[in-house]
Image (spheres, rainbow, N blue to C red):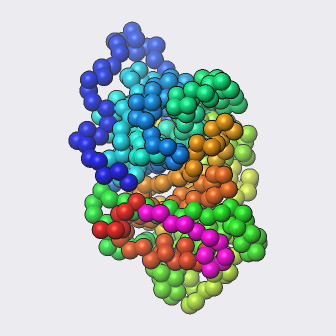
Amino acid sequence: MGKKKEKADEQPDVNRERNTGSRRREQLAWDKLDNTANLFPVIATEQMTNVYRISVSLTEEIDRVLLQEALNRILPKFLVFRMRLRMGVFWYYFEENTKPAPIVREEYNSPGAYIDKSRNNQYMFRVTYYKSRINLEVFHALTDGAGGIIFLKELVYQYLRLRYPELLAVEKDKISPGVFLDKEDSYIKNFKKGHAKVYKSEKAVCLNSERLPKGEMGILHGYFPVDQLKAVSKKYGVTINQYLVGVFVYSIYKEYLKSQPSKTPINCCVPVNLRPYYESHTMKNFFAMVSAVFRPEKENYTLEEVIEIVAEDLKAQITPENLNNIMSYNVSNEKNWILRAVPLFVKNIGIKMVYGTSAKATTATVTNIGNIELREPYQKYVEHFYTTISMSKGQNMKGGICSYNGVLTFTFSSVLSDTSIQKRFFQTIVKDGVAVAVESNGAYDE
């Protein structure tokens, strides 16, 4: 990781905003926050930033000037990213941001650090770099990982066209064909009445131990051949995602619970991209949360037993009917006319209370943003993609998954100094016959 520190978190004040008089302001685009996004401004703090990172490693070191120019060129085409957060009487809302793009800086902070919008030209994302790696960090109110990947890919394409002008001989300097810039609220569009309560408030195992120094986050990347993961997952009769979540839960059971029974379950949340279920192409958030729950009722569960329990739990929940029920239940609260009439400051108090209760019901989160594909002319310039998730209340360790060019990367992010769970995770997969290469950001070396 880059060790460079800077006083200013983001953009200096020398970039002045364009004319924002009342006449100009009336012409600015504005938008409602989607159903999921309404939560993030309320609960965000410097410790719980709700900022995720998607990174890409190229084959050569980054040219900062060209990366800034690439960002300047693509940002005007992405209205979803060109928004600032405003506070209304009843809800937060987005307003078009007319300020210059955020300044691209060398990485100087831990992944997922708080985005101070007042020092970032009011933008809710930032772009940093370190050696050959580009980092896109996004406040979750803007979009989810699917939207972040679209933006990052276009940033990489534009950067590579500037870095290697010969690409322009076969590629035009514009957004890729087939990319949708849709900012539809797919939650509202697909909402259906008639749903049951979907969330439980049962307390779950919370991972706690000695912490890393304040402001530090430990990162461990594990690189696995996709074909080997497919083979071992098939052996267990599960998908790759179910296998990895199962091994993660097993590692918590073995290292944190020491293979002992527990009155509280291990509850691992898994976000599910809803776009394929509704033929949505929105750039805004559109996902639902399901949970893999493992209840250790005896000693010494085997890996096979834990994977089977986790896989069956996920299979039962990831169905069109259940996902629709989850989505509709969430949206119903937003549509409740009584709640809509409550002033924002009162809503914020209620949201924080509900979130505080629900946070105790989750041990960790594992998110999989899927297989990332690049167009042929650009593939040879890119080595890896990574996704890193910031911490949440009650969750001191998380996992992020993505794959590119036949290699799956599982990234642990944690504020705990103990790495026994991560080590057990990698060792378990190696014992199953899958090769792994592990890389750290150095937080555990001190």
Q: Position of residue 216 (x, y in %)?
A: 32, 59
In the picture shown, does residue 362 fall above or below 90?
below
- 237 falls in the magenta region: no
In the picture shown, does residue 175 fall above or below 295?
above
Report the span colored magenta.
430-440
Outermost residue toward the left in this view: 7
The part of the image, by quadrant, that contains residue 410 is bottom right
* Residue nearest the observer in this picture, 46 or 295: 46
Quadrant in which the N terminus is drawn: bottom left
Outermost residue toward the top in this view: 23
The part of the image, by quadrant, that contains residue 214 is bottom left
The residue shown at (66%, 52%) is 405
Q: Is residue 214 left or right of residue 98?
A: left
Q: Position of residue 224 (x, y in %)?
A: 61, 64
The residue shown at (40%, 11%) is 24
Q: Is residue 441 left or right of residue 173?
A: left
The residue shown at (30%, 68%) is 446
Q: Is residue 135 left or right of residue 151?
A: left
- 431 falls in the magenta region: yes
Q: Position of residue 378 (x, y in %)?
A: 63, 38
Say if residue 429 shows up in the picture.
yes
Q: Position of residue 414 (x, y in %)?
A: 41, 64
The residue shown at (48%, 54%) is 388
Total numbered badges shown on the rendered structure: 0
* Residue nearest the observer in this picture, 374 or 260: 374
In the picture shown, does residue 78 fall above or below 34?
above
Say if residue 192 shows up in the picture.
no
